[in-house]
Image: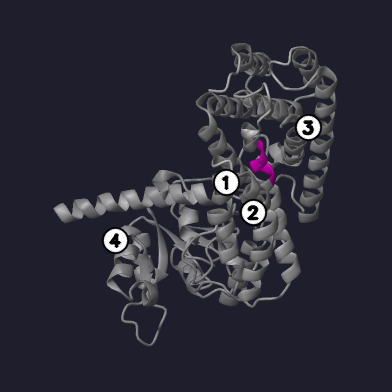
Amino acid sequence: MAKEILVRFLRAVTSAGLAAFARVVTGVRPLWLGTTPSDRQRIYFANHASHGDFILLSACLPARERERTRAVAAADYWGKSRLRRFIAEDMLRSVLINRNFVERKEDPMAVMLGVLDQGDSLILFPEGTRNTTGMPIQPFKSGLYNLALARPDVELVPCYIENMSRVLPKGEFLPVPLLCRVVFGAPIAPGANEERHAFLSRARDTLAALDPRPGRR
Amino acid sequence: MPSVSLPMILAPFAVLALASAVAAVLNRRAGGRPDPTLLNLTQRINAWWVMVILLTGAFLIGKSAIILLFAFVSFAALREFVTLTYSSRSDHWVLLAMFGVILPFQYWLVWTEWYGLFTIFIPVYCFLLMPAVTALRGDTSRYLERVAQQQWAIMIAVYCISHVPFLLFLAVPGFEGRQTMLIVFLIVVVQGSDVLQYIFGKLFGRHRVFTPFAPLQAGLVALMICTLGFLGGLVASAIKRDQGVKDWGHLIEGHGGMLDRADSLVFAAPIFFHIVRYYWTV
């Protein structure tokens, strides 16, 4: 019981602290272009280049929405050591799914749907891993499409995260203070006859189109 | 506290109070729906309140507060500048050093009044070492572009702006302890309109209590500051246009970023500093 209270306290401090830290370092500002903050259950899907991505995204959400929005993260990375698992699961309330379909015991879809059924919102990075390729956004994995079909009443909101790849690149530990913005676009949904591949590439194009400084070299 | 007279402290507050009152009347006339111009005006006046309160507070507290305030201005300006530039992943450590080492060290040099190193630390040591670090990382694609942008960023945002607080330590004979007024003069002339410059010349030219300048000198120095301020604004616009953005950032509501407010100060500060140092100090 005491431990549970302590963990909840630490979790609240971590969440508020990280959001404040993100604001100080990146001066992050949300641009609500295609939608507004709302209480509706949502899946925020975003481009992924840095561990800082979900911190930045949740820092842009209103406090109440932030509390019930959980990031989907890789169990094969965050579950590797006890410390990582503690940070990811207990402090950040991440939803851990295993990307390795040979070794995994739990079905990622079942895990994510379970969280949605509790009424929580999700942050999803459909690229599946941090992007270091130099291309703007990597091809999407299927999870986004499957979730959309399974829970059609949950809104899929595209969120373009700007600059985070430069603030905290993969493999680095200290963030460089640079200005970041998160652009929230209009929600999308698969069409009646839209097949998996078409929807996923449309979702990716929608996200790429939100880049506030397209074509910058 | 370096002597700043009471009217000098109260004047900007009086002007702002008047501006706020006018804006309030206009807002009431507009009913619930003020047009974008009025909204922007209100935001700008509010931002000016914050800026004037911060500056006055720092001036009243003294040296350390003034140095810290301008270190913060440099931080915000550097962040905006570097955000616009191109950098690759291998620049991470150089960028970190710009924020975490060079900026604090330059302002520490101001604080210790180490004039010699203050003037050469960035243009000599940093300008040689930063490209060396970049080359050591081995990534040479668009090397010259990256290095040039980093150096220009540190020059504009840190080196130039750090000359403002160093004005506090210029030993102008007969003007000891009142150097804060040099900063006030610089900021008012840079930010103010022609009217303000005129008033300043009339007011402070006659009595050399506020600035060490005789009337004609004050006019000439003010003219020089304005010209440089204009050129600074021009250069800042050229950079923004090249990078395809309208504002440097979004720090100050209604004004854009820190550099949108400080671009003219950036160019005027070091030259004003050296002119005063050359002609008025012993």
Using the numbered discs, state the Cα–Cα distance from disc 3 to disc 4 in whole angstroms: 65 Å
Using the numbered discs, state the Cα–Cα distance from disc 1 to disc 2 in whole angstroms: 9 Å
* Residue type at numbered disc 3: Tyr
Q: Residue at x 64, y 27 (%)?
A: B179
Q: Which mark is residue A90?
A: 4
x then y, percent, for residue B101 = 54, 55
Seen from the viewer's position, the closer of residues B59 and B10 is B59
Q: Residue at x 57, y 42 (%)?
A: B71
Seen from the viewer's position, the closer of residues B209 and B200 is B209
Q: Residue at x 30, y 53 (%)?
A: A11
Asked if labels 3 and 2 touch by Cβ distance under 8 angstroms, the answer is: no
Asked if labels 2 and 1 touch by Cβ distance under 8 angstroms, the answer is: yes
For label 3, the SS is helix
Residue tagged 3 = B279
Q: Marks 2 and 3: which is nearer the front?
A: 3
Q: Residue at x 33, y 63 (%)?
A: A87
Asked if labels 4 and 3 touch by Cβ distance under 8 angstroms, the answer is: no
Q: Which mark is residue B184?
A: none
x then y, percent, for residue A44 = 50, 58
Residue tagged 1 = B109
